[in-house]
Amino acid sequence: MRPHYIIPVLVAPFAHAQWDPSRYLYFNTAGSGLSSSLPIGNGRVAAAVYGTAVEKITLNENSVWSGQWQDRGNSKSQGALSSIRQKLMNGDISSAGQDALDSMAGNPQSPKQYHPTVDMAIDFGHSGTLGGYTRVLDTKQGTAMVTYSLGGVNYTREYVASYPAGVVAFRMTASQAGKLNLGISFNRSQSVASNIASSSGSVNAVTLKSNGGIAFTAEARVVADGGNVSVNGKTLSVKGATTVDIFFDAETAYRYSSSGAWEAELKKKLDNAVTAGYSGVKTAAVKDAEGILSRVSLNLGSSGSAGAQTVPSRLSNFKKNANADPELLTLYFNYGRHLLLASSRDTGDRSLPANLQGIWNDNYDPPWQSKYTININTEMNYWHALTTNLEETHKPLFDLVDLTRTRGNAMAKKMYGCNDGFVIHHNTDLWGDAAPVDKGTPYTVWPMGGAWLSKHLMDHYHFTQDKAFLQNRAWPVLKDAANFYYCYLFMYNGNYVTGPSLSPENTFVVPSNMRTAGKTEGLDIAPAMDNELLWELFNNIIDAAEILGINNTDVTKAKDYLSKIKTPQVGSKGQLLEWRNEYQEGEPAHRHFSHLFGLFPGSQMTPLVDNKLAQASKVALDNRIRAGSGSTGWSRVWAMNLYARLMDGASVWSNGVTFLQTYPLDNLWNSGENRWFQIDGNFGFTSAIAEMLLQSHSIVHILPALPKSAVAKGNVKGLVARGNFVVDIDWSGGSMTQATITSRSGGDLSLRVESGGSFKVDGKDYTGPIKTTVGGKYVVTKG
């Protein structure tokens, strides 16, 4: 196989004005690796396009993981629980932590990891210098394209991922008849049962079968316009064609009981795609993606010539002068929406959510196993799903929650002796693995995953007002999550508390009146985040029950436990405390803001709900940022969302600028430590921009955190507020000029504009909640 080298290209001496800088990722060179590829996907199958001379396309199917489920639960846990708690209550922190690791850590320590599916190579036989090379990704259509010229011929490569067809498809075209000569092959370095090219009748294919952790079959169908097709070993060769279309799919043992079943599904999808043809597949795919992605539009100002540069140039220039390219922030917002739609769709039975890398992976040992980390990262992936009008992306997360309920119920019994409800710790995989992961007191024993994940189902109701969803999907999860805590919590100093538990991945210094004094530890009783998660969960139970007309022991229990949850505490310096006591921080610049969950994404400590706690949260947040937090992309964008909730637009913007100057990879993917790709930061950034412009906790708040000096003029259309209101906003001079609110479900509409001044609705002074009608539009203007 020829190497995937980059042919020298003639780089135009001027910027390219064709590509809208808020919509397209534009390059004039090929990608050199996954982090400079162009990512597309249909929610299940994805492609990362390099645009190299010998085209390399990394292909992923989201259920290709390293193996089957295994019970990793520690059988010693239940017997050790009481003594560990007693040690924690007695202040024997270090001994309790060691006992917890010995008795509660999973065996083996990690669940399964996400694996690559296959790489496709398309050898064009091109050598020499290419002219006019362009490579672009369209964030509004979910398509990619490469164009260049060689020897007087213009070559175009098109790439699309089709949700309706369930395949990804590529079209290679030459401007002169008969000038396409291709060799198409697959490559996979592990667990290959067979890898063959075949040509029989009208069916030309390359097929790879894997017998790895989760068996699968991957196939590319090739349709040539003109020319001849032949087989050369594992390569399908096309000579003298003008257009060549390639359709790809992979199906796995995760969703089908036998190879016959998944290969029948594979054949059906590819047969249908070939029958529809590339144009038919692309037309349906674009209609689907653009119909969803075009619901929201954002304008934060024009970049002029600065936006016409390539992405690498824009990133470089942004470090020198962020003010010159406001459309880079708009592009990043749009890119986050494209990436979520590409990596998370309802694909039928057992759909899977976006993992740590979304859906794109070329590594058999990816960073953090590219799994589902649920002490922040998985949840962050979905923060913008509802606010930016991407309801369709949410179901895969709920499918995963249902898997964890089953596994988590068994784990609750095994580890904690709790027969009802479910527990899940800080990571899971495609099997819903619920056991603790890794081995360390700052992260292993954290039984709060169910509380956090269940919040997303209640959020879904709040934004969509779908009562059937609340009844049939959300209520059972909320009830099961709460049932575990009714069993697991214990009384300590008059409160129901968690323990052993932790504040995700952070540590404190054991004080002199505890053991072992001076040592940094992570395990304790009743960390602040746990209390805030429980406050959210029990309130959601009470609210859901009222909406559904339920009045039973589920409600009375929730009310009883809620009244005995420890309230957030404020420390001696005015900061919100992270632990049960005012411990010295083990890492003042820690990347997590776990104790600020109640500010964002929770709702307990927002300024309009409890301003005292909001201001204590701000002190804690400011202190951590000054100490050096925000040290990964996802941490920095969490800070953006927190500042948005604090209505501090200037800090939202400054942290957004810092993020874009520090963390994006060449293709604008977010990075974490060691510059490893981690997609959560992309999604958290999009969420923060939405929160900056619209919030909706009991009131639809227009422009709560607008950075007036940075974005004095702009507009946004299509954001969604709780209550199922769609909101369009225009502003100028740092102030709203008009907002139009469309009610999709009826119901009462309460409003606030900016810092709370007077305004009009439909020309009349606003004096209180408005009873809306389904489809009704309400125009908001300044007084």
Image (cartoon, rainbow, N blue to C red):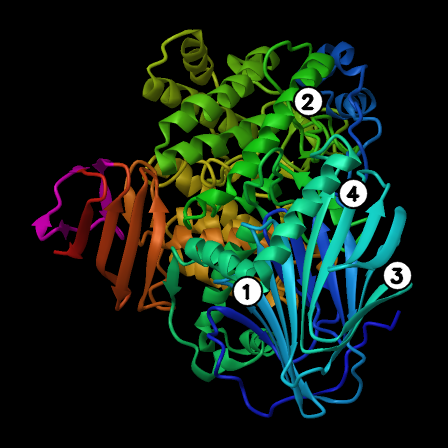
Range of magenta residues: 746-771
Disc nearer the start of the sequence (2/4): 4
Numbered disc 4: secondary structure? strand
Q: Which percent across, then down, holds residue 30?
A: 70, 75
Asked if the residues shown at circle 4 and circle 3 are in contact, with their CB atoms under 8 angstroms apart, the answer is: no
Distance, label 4 to label 3, CA atoms, is: 18 Å
Residue 234 is labelled as 3
Amino acid on which disc 3 is placed: Lys
Dividing the picture into quadrants, the one containing residue 53 is bottom right
Q: Is residue 257 left or right of residue 398?
A: right
Residue 377 is labelled as none
Asked if the residues shown at circle 1 and circle 2 are in contact, with their CB atoms under 8 angstroms apart, the answer is: no
Q: Work out whether residue 190 can be spotted.
A: no
The residue under label 4 is 216
The residue under label 1 is 279
**Above/below status of 14 relative to 197:** below
Decide: few, some or many residues near mark 2? Use Cα within 10 Å; few <14, some 14-19, many ≥20.
many
Distance, label 3 to label 1, CA atoms, is: 28 Å
Disc nearer the start of the sequence (1/4): 4
Disc nearer the start of the sequence (3/2): 3
Distance, label 3 to label 2, CA atoms, is: 42 Å
Dividing the picture into quadrants, the one containing residue 245 is bottom right
In the image, 95 versus 774, the foreground residue is: 774
Numbered disc 3: secondary structure? loop
Asked if the residues shown at circle 3 and circle 1 are in contact, with their CB atoms under 8 angstroms apart, the answer is: no
